[in-house]
Every structure is written in structure tokens, then in C-alpha cells.
Image (cartoon, rainbow, N blue to C red):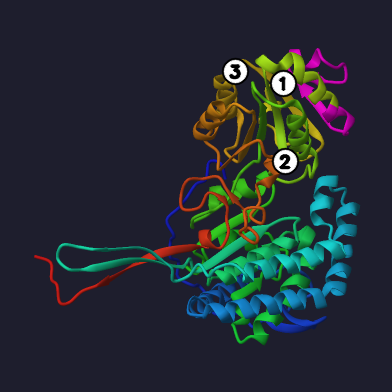
Amino acid sequence: MGRKRVHMRSVYALKCSIAPVDRRQTGSGNVPVLNLKSDFADADDLDTLMAGIGRRARAAGRAMALAPAQTKDLALRAIAEQIRASAPEILRENARDVSAAQAAGQTKAIIDRLTLDEGRVAAIAEAVEKVAGLPDPVGRQLAAFERPNGLLIERISVPLGVVGVIFESRPNVTADAGALCLKAGNAAILRAGSDSHRTATAIAAAMSEGLARTGLPADAIQLVPTRDRAAVGLMLTGLGGCVDVIVPRGGRSLVERVQAEAKVPVFAHLDGICHVYVAEGADLAMARTVLLNSKMRRTGICGAAETLLVDAAVAKTHLKPLVEALLESGCAVRGDAETQGVDPRVTPADETDWRTEYLDAIISAKVVEGLDAAIAHIEANGSHHTDAIITDDTEAAARFLNEVDSAIVAHNASTQFADGGEFGFGAEIGIATGRMHARGPVGVEQLTTFKYRVHGSGQTRP
């Protein structure tokens, strides 16, 4: 979403009425599924299905906007409890998704993002509980002032409305997105990728059951019950004015499509081309530790470092040990001429490498002539996601933090802290790199907007 396109929401007339949707018993919850023999609908069926989902989400969103904070938190805790109770079914469905992905020849990075185990399911439930423990973002007084004519004006936080989330691979997004939207008083329409559809369906079933147990509308969290990609296109139209914002989480092709076609605002990032700049004044041991964590902790996430920049002032002492540390950790290094000169295992980097999000154990590396050159390289090649400087020079760090135009900038810290949970947001619905409304991890506060309340005593405008 580094070059996010934001559209004004268009209102479309609904072309057809709500389609009848079966509630087919699946494990511990009732999951809406298409009344078809496959996961695909013809055009008329799909239009009707999606129009119904949008209408129900809009109605649920109105109810959620008025839900007391305590009720929302009770629902979130019930959802976490139900996810734990449903862990065997979730893991069974996830094993089917993983097996299908392996048979389709998906990459190790995609398999890693898709795979759940008992620990990851427990972490999903825990993340939902953390969201319940956050302050309620709805109804906060953001500002208040009095005009000379006696009018009292308040700016108050309110829900966005209906949030559409389109995601691939990561089944935990089902719970994260649903929980965050619920906490912020929104309704969510979730569209999982084909690779995670079974797992997402099982998680959504647990969430619907948790909602129902606490009296909130089950339609506040709806999973699109079809793999048909045409459903994505319908969501991008706004479903007749029922969707207020779209959040895509997935590969470049998905995000590009969403940004190109969406008729509603989009919160997203296009690439995660993150840099670690080892500047003059960097402690070598710290640089090594932070660099390895930034690159190798999890190579398939958007906050993983993809480029190492080493200042010429410390290249003689820092470049070789940093490159060797990467290579010894199993990371391939593609470098400029100077980087190739410190180790024969380094392969040449070309211009495309500086703009590549590898999402794998590969990094590009380059020596730069000072802070200005580092900032210029990041501006020319980065994606405005997350960039870090390693240095004990506070003035250089301050310049980097001020001048690098990224959603997240870090000093002496790993780029992999680019995560809503690590920011104390409980979870995130995605990382936004645009400049409209939300930037960085999109948590509960970013899923609200505001309105003005004007209090008068009979004033009229002259």
C-alpha cells in the first residue's frame, strides 16, 4: 500500500434480493455455506449471495456501533474460549489446507504462513483476549472547544461501519481481523484465500458461536462462503454501498488488484521492502544481532529486512562479519562489488534486487557513502513500510527517523517489530503505508473515524 489509492465510496443500487443461505452444521458452529454442489456459484447466485452478505453486515454494523464496551469484551472472551475448544477441528481443517498447498507446489514461505499447530491456535485465542483487554476506542472525546457564539463542539470517535478484509495464506487473520473490527464497533466481511479457506471457515464458525452466546449479531463477522474469485470483485465495488473500507492482506498481485479496482478506501501496503542501515557509530555486536533478527526470525513476513546498507565509514570493520553472519545463518547474499569482495559466496546484485521483496532467506547488500546516500537509496527503492538504522550517533538517528518517509522507522531495533501485537495494539488487521487515515499497524483505533457533535442554545447563523 506504499502508493495507496483511495477512492470516494460510491453507492450502487442493489440489483437483487438476499439469497437463501443454508446454516449447515459444521463441528461446533453453524457456518453459512452456499447451497451448491461446489465452492463456486454462477453469476446470478454470486451477486445475490454477496448482496445479502453486504446487507446483513450493514445491519449488524449498526447494532455493533451501539454495543456497550462490556458486551463487546465479553463476546471477544467467549470467542477466544470457543477457538480453544474448537482447536481439534481447526487443526484438522488446517492439515487439509496445508496438504493441498504442498500438492500444489506452494513455496516454503506460503506453507509457513498457512500452517497452524497447537501453539499457534493458542496464540490466536490469546490475541483475541488481548484485544478484549484494550481500551474501548468508540465514544472517546478527541477534542472539544467553544466558539465565540456559544456553540460547544466535540469531536467523538465512532466506528468505520463495515470493513471488508481480503486475505491469503494466513488463517489467523480471520480471528485478528474479526476481533479488531468487533472491538471498534464494526462489522466485518472476511474473504479468505483458496489456500486457507477450510481453516478460516473453522475459525469463523468458532467466532460466530462466541458472538451468539453473548447476544451480539452473528452477522457482525461473516466469512464469504465461496472460493470464487469473482466475490473479490464484488466486494471491491462496495456491495451497493454496504462496505466502507477494504483491507487486503496478501501478495503483490492481490494488493495491486484491490488498489486498482476498489471503489471504497483501501488500507494496505504493496510491498515490504525493509532496510537495515548500519551507520557510522554502529556497535558491531548490536548490528549483527538486530540484522539477523530482522532478516531471519521469519523470512516470509512483510517486516522482514530485504536490504542491508552498510556505511562506507564502517565497511572495513563491519561489512565482512555481517555478511558472514548472514551466510552462516543460511541466508543468501546478493551484493554490490564491495560486498562481493568480502566473501566469494556473495552473488552479484542487479538493479531489480534493490526493489525485490524476497520473502525468503535472501538479502541484498550494499555499501553507501554516508547518511544522505542511505536515505536516498531507501527513498528510491523502498516501499515506505519499515526501515531501521543501527548507530550510537543520536544526531544521525534523529535525521534518519525524521527524513525516511516510511510508516515505521526504527533506531537500534529489529524491523520485525512492525506488528500490531508488538505495538501493544493486541493484534493488527494489516500494515498501511499510505497517508490517508491509517498508517503503520492498523489496530482498533485506526478502525474508527470521528464525527462532530454540536451543542447549541438556539444559535442561528447570520
Crowd around label 2: few <14 · some 14–19 · many ≥20 (10 Å): many
Pinpoint residue 306: horizontal percent, then vertical percent.
72, 34
Instruction: Answer above or below: position of 307 versus 22.
Output: above
Q: Earlier in the sequence, mark 3 or mark 1?
A: 1
Instruction: Report how far apart the C-alphas of labels 1 and 2 lie in the structure.
Output: 20 Å
Q: Quadrant of the C terminus?
A: bottom left
Q: Secondary structure at mark 1?
A: loop
Q: Secondary structure at mark 3?
A: loop
Instruction: Report how far apart the C-alphas of labels 3 and 1 lie in the structure.
Output: 21 Å
For the residues carrying marks 3 and 2, which lies nearer the camera in this image? 3
Amino acid on which the number 2 mark rests in the picture: Ala
Give the residue displayed 49% in from the left and 76% down from the top.
65
Pinpoint residue 246: horizontal percent, then vertical percent.
56, 58
Decide if residue 199 is on the left or right side of residue 386: right
183 or 436, which lies in front? 183
Q: Quadrant of residue 56?
A: bottom right
Q: Is residue 43 visible?
A: no
Q: Which residue in the structure is indicated by mark 3?
A: 370
- In the image, the segment drawn in magenta is 325-349
391 or 181, which lies in front? 391
Pinpoint residue 79: horizontal percent, then vertical percent.
70, 76
Residue 350 circle label = 1
Residue 304 circle label = 2
Amino acid on which the number 1 mark rests in the picture: Asp
**458 in magenta:** no
Amino acid on which the number 3 mark rests in the picture: Gly
Pinpoint residue 100: horizontal percent, then vertical percent.
88, 58
Q: Secondary structure at mark 2?
A: loop
Give the residue displayed 71% in from the left and 82% down from the top.
209
**334 in magenta:** yes
